[in-house]
Amino acid sequence: MKYQLIVAALCALPATAFAQNCEMKLGAMGPMSGGAAQWGLAMKSAAELAAAEVNQQGGVKMGDKTCKVVVVPYDSKYTADGAAAGSNAFAAQDIHLIIGPVGSPEATGIKPVAARNEQVAWNAAYAKNSLEPKFPLMFHIAPGPAVWGEAVVKRAMAVFPMKTVTLIAPNDQAGTDTVSLDVEAYKANKVATTEEYYQRGTTNFAPIVTRILAAKPDVVDTASSPPGDAGVIVKQLRLAGFTGAIGRLGGPGTDEIIRVSGGIDVLKDFFWFETVPTDDPKVRDIDAEYKKLLGKDPIGGTAVWADLPAARMTLKAVSIAGTDDAKAVAAALRTLPVDDPNIGKGYWTGKKQYGLAQELNFPFGIGIIKDGKNLGVERQEVKPE
């Protein structure tokens, strides 16, 4: 009878109770402070949910052990130095797998350091060299504007006829690389472009706003400006009298832009790219699952949903490889199908643009706000490369 009671008690324990004989640390890196904090915190939330899912099932299999996954965050501050320092900090803790970093400066900083430390890392940068064959342990969370930019512009033009656009972005690799790709998308649709750049940390965009108003573009595109910066730009544009549509060929963050700018009535006319189809109920279920498993809401908005597949696939690859050794995990990752239970079926791409097919290409979304009313996000399917 006593034995039966012990067995019954063990069966009643949560699955995570069986993952205590060892731990596997998973790094989560990105800007977790400043204007781009939403993106870095999204990386952290995605890693946390993927870890919680695995831990609920007992942990990740590593050899003859079942290990609890523990997420270790690092604020890389959207800088190359920050990402390089983060890689070294993770290496000191024997962390071989990193979800992140986010932007192009961070990707530039982490690639050689992570290669030396033998770490798999997933960047979300739109840099033209986000992946390079000489860094085979680097993976890409989603394609950049070279893949989806024209589709977003075509959809926007059906709602907001335009002949001219001014693009605004930070004056660094993240900004200039993204804008150069965005320009190609607009020009392919016969829209003339001009460009404006600012230093990161800028809070007063009055000089730029003055030049934009003088140029009288039909549309202003905030490109890869962090959501916090983009919200301030929108607010200052509207206060100065700009009445045209505002676009965003630079990634998620619409909720934060609405908040910072002063509301959807201030934003008024807006179009943007979403890395996942955010109106899909299955995609939205991710937040409910996060709250169920972690007892709180995720931080990072829709970017959490986009970052999650990379974290899930990484932990699945660990179980296949039976180790968190970066080279073994990378080899296992390359064999996995791109198919997420919430987002749907995608493909490995990147070979054409980067020479390395280590980029996740999932269905994405195109959002429209017209006259202060959110018209929703249209799902866009993708094709193999």
Image: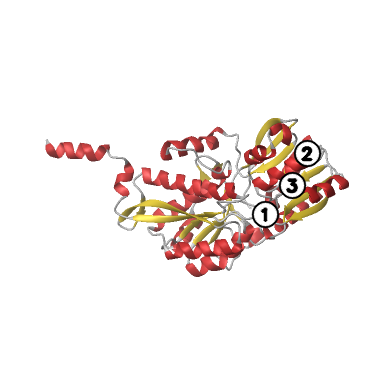
Instruction: Look at the numbered discs 1 and 3 and tell me whether their residues touch, using CB distance below 8 Å.
Output: no
Residue 201 - label: 1
Query: How far apart in space, not on screen, are marks 2 and 3 (Cα)?
Result: 30 Å
Q: Nearer the viewer, residue 272 or 30?
A: 30
Going 54% across and 44% down the picture, which residue do you hit?
A: 304
Is residue 327 among what the camera can see? no
Q: What residue occupies the far bottom of the structure in this picture?
A: 116
Residue 239 - label: 2
Query: How far apart in space, not on screen, are marks 1 and 2 (Cα)?
Result: 21 Å
Residue type, mark 1 in image: Gly
Residue type, mark 2 in image: Leu
Query: How far apart in space, not on screen, are marks 1 and 3 (Cα)?
Result: 30 Å
Q: Earlier in the sequence, mark 1 or mark 3?
A: 3
Q: Is residue 87 left or right of residue 215?
A: left
- Nearer to us of marks 2 and 3 is 2
Q: Nearer the viewer, residue 347 or 378?
A: 378
Q: Nearer the viewer, residue 358 or 48?
A: 48
User: In the rendering, at what x and y percent does residue 87 appear?
Assistant: 50, 63
Q: Is residue 96 left or right of residue 206?
A: left
Q: Residues within 10 Å of mark 1 (few under 14, many from 20)?
A: few
- Element assignment for label 1: loop
- Nearer to us of marks 1 and 3 is 1
Q: What residue is disc 3 on? A: 150
Q: Specify the quadrant that holds the N terminus.
A: top left
User: In the rendering, at what x and y percent does residue 88 appear?
Assistant: 49, 65
Q: Residue 373 lies in what quarter of the image? A: top right
Q: Earlier in the sequence, mark 1 or mark 2?
A: 1
Going 83% across and 47% down the picture, which residue do you hit?
A: 210
Going 63% across and 60% down the picture, which residue do you hit?
A: 105
Residue type, mark 3 in image: Glu
